[in-house]
Image (cartoon, helix red, strand yellow):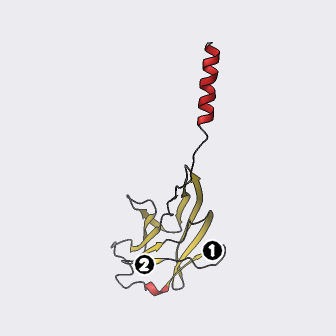
Amino acid sequence: MKIYIYSLFLLFILTSCEGYNCDGIDCFTPPPSFSFEIIDAQTNENLFSNGTYNENQIQIYNTQTNDLIKYSLDNHIINVFSLGWKTERVNATVKIGEVVIFNFIVDAEIVNENCCSFTRIHEFKVENINYELNNFNPYSVSILVEN
């Protein structure tokens, strides 16, 4: 009798848990933006606001494809919103005029879990320059330029 009750209980558990039903659930979190403030390493001044660099001369491009990467400027801070919308690994270069200021890498994967889609960042790395990470946002960086 105990085996019969246990078998019914087990059958009930296995048939009632058919996984997630995602019908009617619309859940998506966009990828993070990557922000770069370019500052003087000695004075901590923003090099756009003090006139050292011209914001119109910024170029950000994918070093593998040479495609330009879209960005915006907000209070003299470069914001890259165009990465991480698909699974990709991007090696990027930031130039101002003809000078390469730094490189960065973003390795992003689109993930679907529990009825939701989001971007998982496997790697975000700044190369070829000294920098400081923002304590509150791991994708916000102060680039320290030696003048």
Residue type indicated by callout 1:
Thr
Instruction: Give the class, few, some or many, for how many residues have Cα within 10 Å of label 2's Cα (few <14, many ≥20).
Output: few
Residue closer to the observer: 142 or 81: 81
Which residue in the rendered view is the most extreme toward the top? 1
The residue depicted at 38 percent of the width and 58 percent of the height is 136
**Disc 1, SS:** loop
The residue depicted at 38 percent of the width and 71 percent of the height is 41
Viewed as shown, does residue 90 lie left or right of 28?
right
Q: Which mark is residue 73?
A: 2
Viewed as shown, does residue 96 lie left or right of 39?
right
Do the residues bearing badges 1 and 2 touch, measured as CB atoms within 8 Å? Answer: no
Residue closer to the observer: 21 or 116: 21
Say above or below: 145 vs 51: above
The location of residue 28, given as percent across then percent down, is 51, 60
Q: Earlier in the sequence, mark 1 or mark 2?
A: 1
Q: Which mark is residue 53?
A: none
Gap in Å between the C-alphas at discs 1 and 2? Answer: 21 Å
The residue depicted at 58 percent of the width and 61 percent of the height is 108
The quadrant of the rendering that contains the N terminus is: top right
Viewed as shown, does residue 19 lie left or right of 49?
right
Say above or below: 2 vs 42: above
The location of residue 146, given as percent across then percent down, is 43, 74
The location of residue 77, given as percent across then percent down, is 40, 75
Residue type indicated by callout 2:
Leu
Q: Which mark is residue 63?
A: 1
The quadrant of the rendering that contains the C terminus is: bottom left
**Disc 2, SS:** strand
Foreground mark, 1 or 2, reads: 2
